[in-house]
Amino acid sequence: MSMALCAPCARVYASSMTEWKMHHRIFVAAGVLAAAAVIYTGVKADRMARIGAGYQAKIACSEIFVAGRNAKDIIEGEFNDMDPAMELIGVKVDEKQKRVRAGGPFGFGGVRAVYREGYGCTLANAGHVSSLPEPAEPIEPAAWEEAPPVSGQAIERIDYAALDFALTNAFENNDANHRSVLVAVDGKIVDERYAGGFNRDTAFLSWSMAKSVTATLVGAAALRGFLDVNDPAPVPEWEGDAEKSRITWNDLLRMQSGMAFGEHYDQTRSDVNQMLFERADAGGFAARFPVEHAPGDEWYYSSGTTNLIARTLRQVLAEQEIDFHAFAREAIFDPIGAASVVLEPDASGSFIGSSFVYATARDWARLGELYLRDGVWEGERLLPEGWADYVRSPTQASDGQYGAQFWLNSDGEERPRFFPGVPENMFFFAGHEGQYVFIIPDKRMVIVRTGMTRGRSAMEAVTPLIKEIYDSVGMPQGTAM
């Protein structure tokens, strides 16, 4: 016998079934949304973690295998006083294979950095790193002539007591976290100091001092006729682009290309952080940014610009069947005896010209000295005549603070000079956390300072010491005051 529902019961049943189906759909939709949210959150967390992991893997790899520092010291101390999220990144070092892996919790952001002899460390952002030629045999480090305060060698115009006091006090009360300070006058080392764990054989990271090295290599290429800085930069991605094809080497060197690029280190996934710690081809990444201003109209500090220079220079040299790294050694580093210099490439094989050079304090001083001598070393011209004047001539839109990949110490219309008490004719390499090579023509002096000044302005922290060093050295004989 069939069982029939009464009419009211049927309506209640139909209504309950409709409500159940509706709730079921809501629950399914909610589940899909929840799963999507989890996936989205996971992807976002992975992308965020990848930047922090990339930073730690790269720096740990280079500090251990290029600078030769203790792995335990790096993991426990090099990343202190940074964003608390960096503490969630785990770092593992394979000293036998010379590799470093880093990643966040739950497997997020796994990154690998590999060391290669002669090329330093590279993040394997494409899953692998491009092969590079076997590096040349290293040269013997050239000896610096020294002029300590002893009879027959001292430079008379130096107040050695005042210089000693300034450097001793700086390292005994090392709030600024100096790692090295070297002073050279008349091409001779007159004093150098190192913090514990560092010495004259330690290679120091450039950060943005690398930009001045990139400009030096462009100058060496210009001397040999491989390029003219006033010509448009032959970037492959720009061919046929009416706006970008007008951008010259000079525009790129002076950071007045007009291209958009976000130089924001405090934003995890900013353009510069993605370029340095996530992308396989730093220069290629920078090449694709849109143009916001006509070349020359605006000055904007951009590490992307410098990596585009380095990549394009590599391509120009390759057209002449010249390897970039071999060129750098033969044109600049070998002639000046800078045996410690390492130019670290990205995964595509191009030098990260904005940020990753390693060299000893003595070799950083040699690069500064090359500019003090207008590009001539032991009678051989390595840079075009007047190149030092070119890189220190102010970029118009920069309010006098920037030349061609070099910082200037001139007063601006809207700001004071960076280092008060030191003359306006000083120009310098400058890098994150207080890496500096100061070139001071009026006293024929080069000062190198490396360190890790965090949580405060490195310029403000270093200024008193640089002024004391400057004041301890007199003007050369016959120089008008």
Image (spheres, helix red, strand yellow):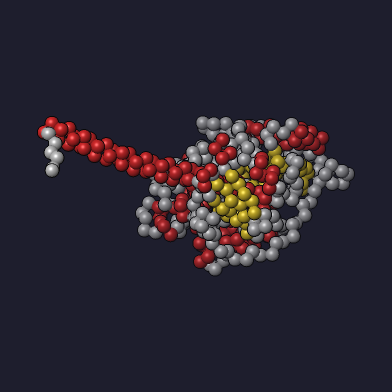
- Asked whether 320 or 74 is in front, the reply is 74
- Asked where in the image residue 24 lies, by quadrant, the reply is top left
Q: Is residue 329 left or right of residue 269?
A: right
Is 281 above or below relative to 84?
Answer: below
Q: Position of residue 476 (x, y in %)?
A: 75, 42
Quadrant showing the N terminus: top left
- Asked whether 344 or 339 is in front, the reply is 344
Question: Residue placed farthest to the left in the image?
Answer: 7
Q: Position of residue 188 (x, y in %)?
A: 77, 48
- Asked where in the image residue 338 lies, by quadrant, the reply is bottom right
Is 146 above or below relative to 142?
Answer: above
- Asked whether 461 or 152 is in front, the reply is 461
Q: Position of residue 23 (x, y in %)?
A: 27, 36
What count of labels does the image hold? 0
Q: Position of residue 403 (x, y in %)?
A: 55, 44
- Asked whether 80 or 302 is in front, the reply is 80
Residue pictured at 36% horizontal, 54% vertical: 242
Quadrant showing the C terminus: top right
> Is residue 78 among what the camera can see?
yes
Residue pictured at 17% horizontal, 36% vertical: 14
Residue pictured at 38% horizontal, 43% vertical: 35
Residue pictured at 57% horizontal, 43% vertical: 89
> Is residue 293 among what the camera can see?
no
Question: Residue placed farthest to the right in the image?
Answer: 151
Question: Residue placed farthest to the front in the image?
Answer: 1
